[in-house]
Amino acid sequence: MIRLEMKRKGEIFMAENNTKHPTKHNALIKTGIVGVVAGLLGGGVAYAGLSQVNGQNAPQTSVVPTTKVEKSSSKNSSEMTNAFNTVKKSVVSVVNLKRQSSSSSSDPFGIFGSDSSSSSKKNSKSDLETYSEGSGVIYMKSNGKGYIVTNNHVVSGSDEIQVILSNGKKVTAKKVGTDSETDLAVLTIDGKYVTQTAQFGSSKNLEPGQQVIAVGSPLGSEYATSVTQGIISAKNRTVDVTNSAGQVTNQATVIQTDAAINPGNSGGPLVNMSGQVIGINSMKLSSSSDGTAVEGMGFAIPSDEVVSIINQLVKNGKITRPKLGVRVVSVDELTEYGRKKLGLPDSVKSGVYVASVTKNGSADKAGIKSHDVITKIDGKDVDSVVSLHTALYTHKVGDTVTLQVVRDGKSQNIKVTLS
């Protein structure tokens, strides 16, 4: 029946070609042809169906597109990556542990990043609990001990201090000495845990625009050894340090950077492209006095001052420093308008401007007046508040120093007995 039907089709086909009596052989060929044609038509119907969906003639085969990961075209690490690798194993998290019954005082520094945790985390050791977390950097290994510098406000009031190393190991640390005025502290751990120490570079050689990285534990040890990058915005910025009541208790000369510094970064290093520590991250400004939100204003204690202080802490356990009894600002921070308003002569290119003098203080008794510009101490140039502090801190209470000051455009020497 099938053959007959196919034959009839063949006959009709041949009839259209004017062949009335096909042979059997021809009929088989025709059947084959008809079969082939039907197959092509069937394929055509299938593709026609695709064309109605896609709106165009589809290819005969369907290929699924794929992609792959290529080898990195960057063969060398960046300078900042190398700098980070130079210090990363020396950076630690510092945990301030307090007794549950202890009443903890608030952060005494109004603009310092508060590392205190509003909800204390339980610690597994007896009745101690985590009060705050910050950062630190191992800078020396000597006599079987590893020495760590951090911020005083990170460890202030602690009953015990725990250090979390870069590999996650927790070890107990001991205080060597602290200094609230510069907000620095030195801790020690067993030297067997030290695998890397950081080196200090001079902060005096910094330039605005220079690239730096900040390393530490923002928001605590959960984000330990986080690294952020920025630039030096100013190398000698004088800021007021206030207590919880908003009273100015001190002035700090700091490095300003836009590298992100968050609560928990306090005490961690600010690092240059050579992998040297050029500052200890200590504070950030999150809002102005009128409540305006501020971004990218972090501050670090300059390394030159850090080294001077921590060496004294290691030697004596504390800092007993002489004071002049003045409030000052670096001349190079003053704008042209500020210079004219203060009446500074063009000849005064550097030094520290005396904004006010403490009554009955060392400077007041010696005859130093507000609007004076201190340019030298004992013949050594004073070009910033840092250099003023550094020169003073080489002396002890009771020493007499000679200050060279510019007053009304004229230079004079004044002897001051430090109290």
Image (cartoon, grey):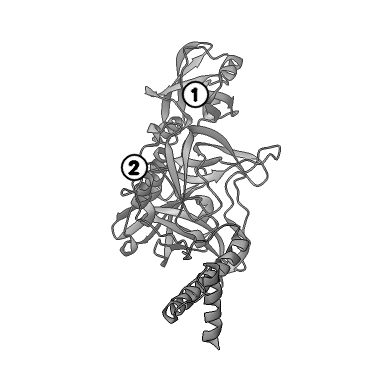
Residue 125 visible in the current orientation:
no
The quadrant the N terminus occupies is bottom right
Residue where numbered disc 2 is placed? 274
Residue situated in front as seen by the camera: 76 or 192: 76
Q: Would you place residue 103 above or below residue 203 in this image?
A: below
**Quarter residue 247 falls in:** top right
Vertical relation: 128 (above or below) 68? below
- Estimate the x, y position of residue 144 in percent, counting from the top left: 29, 60
* Disc 1: which residue: 332
**Element at label 1:** helix
Amino acid type of the residue that numbered disc 1 sits on in the rendered structure: Asp
Label located before the other in sequence (1 or 2)? 2
Task: State which mark lies toward you, 1 or 2.
Answer: 2
Q: Up-down: is 251 above or below 62?
A: above
Label 1 to label 2: alpha-carbon separation: 27 Å
- Label 2, residues with CA under 10 Å away: few <14, some 14-19, many ≥20: some
Rate crowding at label 1 as few (under 14), some (14 to 19) or many (20 or more) other CA atoms within 10 Å: some
Question: What residue is at 60 percent from the left and 51 percent from the top?
Answer: 107
> x, y percentage for residue 119?
63, 64
- In the image, residue 319 above or below residue 342: below
Mark 2 belongs to which amino acid? Answer: Ser
What residue do we see at 59% from left, 46% from top? 109
* Horizontal and vertical percent position of residue 315: 36, 48
Is there any visible trace of residue 329 in the rendered image?
yes
Q: Nearer the viewer, residue 113 or 212?
A: 212
Q: Residue furthest right?
A: 290
Report the residue at 48% width, 22% height from top: 374
Name the spot of residue 88 as percent of width and height, x first. Answer: 38, 54
